[in-house]
Amino acid sequence: MTARVRMADVLPDLPVPATPRAHVCVLASLNFPGITVEDVGLIRRFTRLALTTLIELGATFELWDTTEALDNPSGAGEFDGLLLLGGGDIDGSCYGVSTPNPAGYGIDARADRDAFDAIEATVAADRPIFGICRGSQLLNVARGGTIVPDIVDYALHHGAPGEPTFVDEPIDIVPGTRLASILGADRITGRSGHHQAVDRVGTGLVVTARALDGIVEGIEDPDRFYLGVQWHPEDVDGPAADRQRLFSAFVDAAARSRAVYLAANSASLASTAASSGDA
């Protein structure tokens, strides 16, 4: 029987904040075609730590698993922010590639479409989005960008056959970007295990980080919190301080979005109540 990730495997055993700073939609494919026992272990660890970090920062969440079709992916726009976690490759047809990739992994075009609908709705609602690994690639493709189908010289990004998948990767951060202001460093060490990455950058996006071989490791929209990183800050074996900085920046942005919405909504309710009183 193929191993699978259950929702119960990734939910933190922590009390949720009684008065949350923000309520976040978390999108993940807990299972995907061709999932391996190693994948299952990684997804359990990474997802659980990501959700734990949100709670520790005062946020609550709903975890939407795109293993099965979402009833209403556009409902993501009703949350204070959207977090896109890792998983399998994006179907090449989503960025104009019709030839199947021999190195393709965990491809599920329906899950991709659900993710794009969630991204579109969140952007329309002017909410912050943070994407990790596959999540970062989804953010790029959603803006018309493309993906490197397979990094041939993978040594910086992925373990060799028979070795651990994840490696410590030196990553250069582009000065003057939102990412640089969040991390406060010119170079970090990221936990990486990817064979694909952003190729042509999508409309309105800029590169914020590169590997030593020039591969894109981070993207963002300079005009809004639309941020993606290719490495895995939610790996417990990576630097905890960088994870805290990235997740804190996202939760802070979601909290600001929440405050703006509540202020606008309160004004609207007050105006409605006043109009009713006048009548």
Image: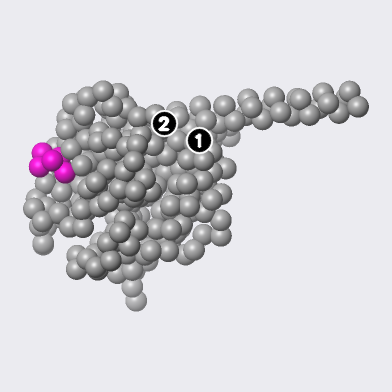
| Label 2 residue SS | loop
Q: What residue is shown at x 69% (from left), y 27% (from top)?
A: 266
Residue 146: percent from left, percent from top: 27, 51
Residue 60: percent from left, percent from top: 51, 40
* Highlighted range, magenta: 211-215
- The residue carrying pointer 2 sits among few (fewer than 14), some (14 to 19) or many (20 or more) residues within 10 Å by Cα, namely some
Q: Can residue 265 be seen in this view?
A: yes
Residue 126, which numbered label?
1
Q: Earlier in the sequence, mark 1 or mark 2?
A: 1
Q: In this view, does 186 lie to the left or right of 20?
A: left
Q: Quadrant of residue 177?
A: top left
Which residue, given by chain and number where applicable, does mark 2 sit on? 224
Residue 97: percent from left, percent from top: 27, 61
Let me know if residue 246 is in the magenta part: no
| Label 1 residue SS | loop
Q: Main secondary structure of the magenta part?
A: loop
